Amino acid sequence: MRPPARFIFRWTVAAIALCAVLLTTIGPWRPANEEQVRSLDPAQVVVLRTPGGFLEVSTLVRNEEFGWRSSRTCPWVDCSALLGQRVGRIRVPVHYTYRMPLADTWTLTLDGDVYVLSVPAPKPLLPPGIDTSKAQITTERGGLLAPGAAANQENLLKNLGPELAQRAQRIEYLQQQMPAAEKTVREFAEKWMKEQRTEPTRPVRVEFRMGDSD
């Protein structure tokens, strides 16, 4: 007696399914192992952690000018006036960012109707940021035998960084950013006090300890 057509259909479907499983597991169409391709070697990434971190309190933007003079030297005699010299100048916007350590000592005291918050003085983040897209570089030659422009500009840019680092620590620069720094610290302290459920009922006055060292 011939088996029913429905019985034959079920066994045919089961046989096809079994063949598909065998082909995907042991057959030539078994997929290879797949994994993510990493484009950056983790060993090349160095993460530096400062305990407590820093609070950026202000950014001072100034258009700075810097010049560099190149001249030739002669043995036993100053020949710069005879052979000529080259002066290169750069004018560029510089971003001086000032910050203060959060892990340092912050002291809050009550002085009459005012909270006095004593904090370390802001320090510049070095090196300062330079907006190279707006840099203007000029060079002037004085004399036919003056040094070339390329070498002069190379030394100009090489010495620009150390010069700006010194300017960032000038007392007049520190004084210019103080109002913005004071406002940032005051708002930060008031927000922190609210989060600690100790909302101040008196204003906060910020005092920077200018004598603190790094």
Image (spheres, rainbow, N blue to C red):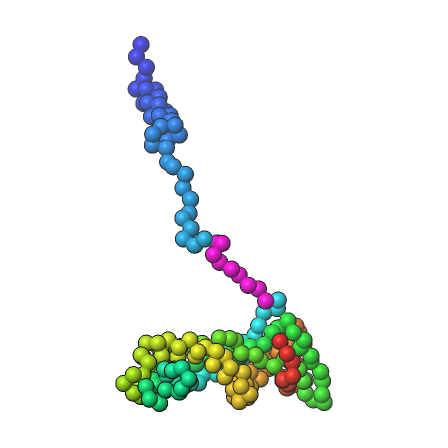
Can see residue 49? yes
Residue at the far front: name it. 76
Q: Is residue 32 magenta?
A: no
Q: Position of residue 72 (x, y in %)?
A: 36, 82
Provide the residue span drawn in magenta. Answer: 42-50
Can see residue 17? no
Quadrant into which the C terminus falls: bottom right
x 56%, y 74%: residue = 55
Q: Position of residue 45 (x, y in %)?
A: 49, 58
Quadrant into which the N terminus falls: top left
Q: Quadrant of residue 192?
A: bottom right
Number of numbered discs overlaid on the protein picture: 0
Residue 89 is left or right of residue 166, and the answer is: left
x 48%, y 78%: residue = 162
Residue at the far top: name it. 1
Residue 130 is left or right of residue 188, and the answer is: left
Q: Toward the viewer: 187 or 99?
A: 99
SS majority, magenta: loop
- Name above or below for residue 8 compared with residue 68: above
x 48%, y 54%: residue = 42
Q: Position of residue 21 (x, y in %)?
A: 38, 29
